Amino acid sequence: MAERARLDERLRAGAPLRVGTVTLLVIERAVVRSYVGASWVGICTAMEPYALVVCDPGGVRALNVEGSTVKLDDLRKRVPEMDVLLRIENPHV
């Protein structure tokens, strides 16, 4: 039997952190890789930061781990719960 590999990768939002008028929301990248051989199974998992969403009186913006801007529309498509979490913390967003 040949080895089979599977990759499951998704983004998810962490818990919002509010400091004064600023809300921070960490977007995490979760990866699960699984391998199945003839007589064995292997699983490897990883969790890493992907972006930081900053919501303050000046607006909402997202930065990746290198500090470059991330398009909010792209992030919203991949992490639909992001807007809900930001609205809970900031009803005027």
Image (tube, helix red, strand yellow):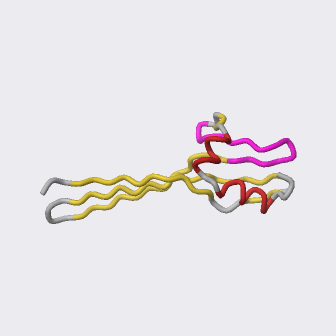
Check residue 19 for magenta coloring. no
Residue at 27% across / 57% down in the picture?
A: 35
Task: Please indicate whether residue 2 sits to the left or right of residue 93 in the image.
Answer: left
Quarter holding residue 87: bottom right
The magenta-colored residue range is 53-66
Q: Position of residue 45 (x, y in %)?
A: 40, 58
Quarter holding residue 70: top right
Residue at 82% across / 43% down in the picture?
A: 59
Q: Position of residue 2 (x, y in %)?
A: 15, 53
Task: Please indicate whether residue 37 sits to the left or right of residue 49 in the image.
Answer: left
Q: Position of residue 40 (x, y in %)?
A: 19, 64
For the view shown, which residue lies furthest in the top direction? 68
Check residue 59 for magenta coloring. yes
Residue at 50% across / 53% down in the picture?
A: 10
Query: Main SS of the magenta segment?
Result: strand
Q: Quadrant of the N terminus?
A: bottom left
Q: How many marks?
A: 0
Residue at 67% across / 54% down in the picture?
A: 82
Task: Please indicate whether residue 31 sits to the left or right of residue 2 in the image.
Answer: right
